[in-house]
Image: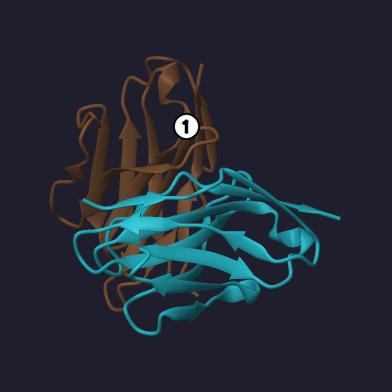
Amino acid sequence: GAVVSQHPSWVICKSGTSVKIECRSLDFQATTMFWYRQFPKQSLMLMATSNEGSKATYEQGVEKDKFLINHASLTLSTLTVTSAHPEDSSFYICSATDRVSYEQYFGPGTRLTVT
Amino acid sequence: AQSVTQLGSHVSVSEGALVLLRCNYSSSVPPYLFWYVQYPNQGLQLLLKYTSAATLVKGINGFEAEFKKSETSFHLTKPSAHMSDAAEYFCAVSRQNGNKLVFGAGTILRVKS
């Protein structure tokens, strides 16, 4: 079946540094990728919608200058957390929509801890 | 706007008992509805989805859900719980297949031996 990978699976960084998270669709092309954030013991909240070759659409309350999203190809989207702070510590999950079937597949998530 | 309400943040059942996880939705357009399962520190696995075809949807691992428009509900059931079903379950709604999802708060299912 369709697979979405995320790299890294977990990362620890110091406050003030930037972290890049990759989301790849391994065996299909994705018209759209979504980035979600999940705080401990909470649900998933959509951060932004990423379309290949165009600017991402951010949800209300999500700082676009802090969470930089790049969707350079039909199989890769990246989320960069800039000047990370401890409150950015969370589980970040991406999903990708197959351009042919319109089925949506989720990645395994990336655990970010900012110290 | 769309929203999802999951009644019961924690549900506990005995092994072999019926599992019922409740989900009510709000949507201004005909909804697409989903149930996902999440194990600790893992991503989401799709259990089943409703896309305006049959109102009774069968999914993986013996789960099924029934879309009831009059009640705006999409409850998840399984006739006989297994220990491996212990996980967190999320109901979600979207405007169309492949579109962004709005998730409920989640229900943690505990299965007692």
Q: Chain of mark 1?
A: A
Residue most extreme to the bottom: B54
Chain shown in brown: A
Residue B109: give x, y in percent of width and height: 66, 51
**In the figure, is residue B65 to the left or right of B41?**
left
Residue most extreme to the right: B113
Residue most extreme to the left: A54
Residue B91: give x, y in percent of width and height: 45, 57
| Residue nearest the observer in this picture, A18 or A90 | A90
For badge 1, the amino acid type reads Ser
Q: Mark 1 = which residue?
A: A90
| Residue nearest the observer in this picture, B3 or A83 | B3
Chain shown in cyan: B
Q: Is residue A111 above or below residue A100?
A: above
- Location of residue A58 (image quadrant): top left
Q: Residue at x 74, y 60 (%)?
A: B84
Q: Residue at x 70, y 54 (%)?
A: B86
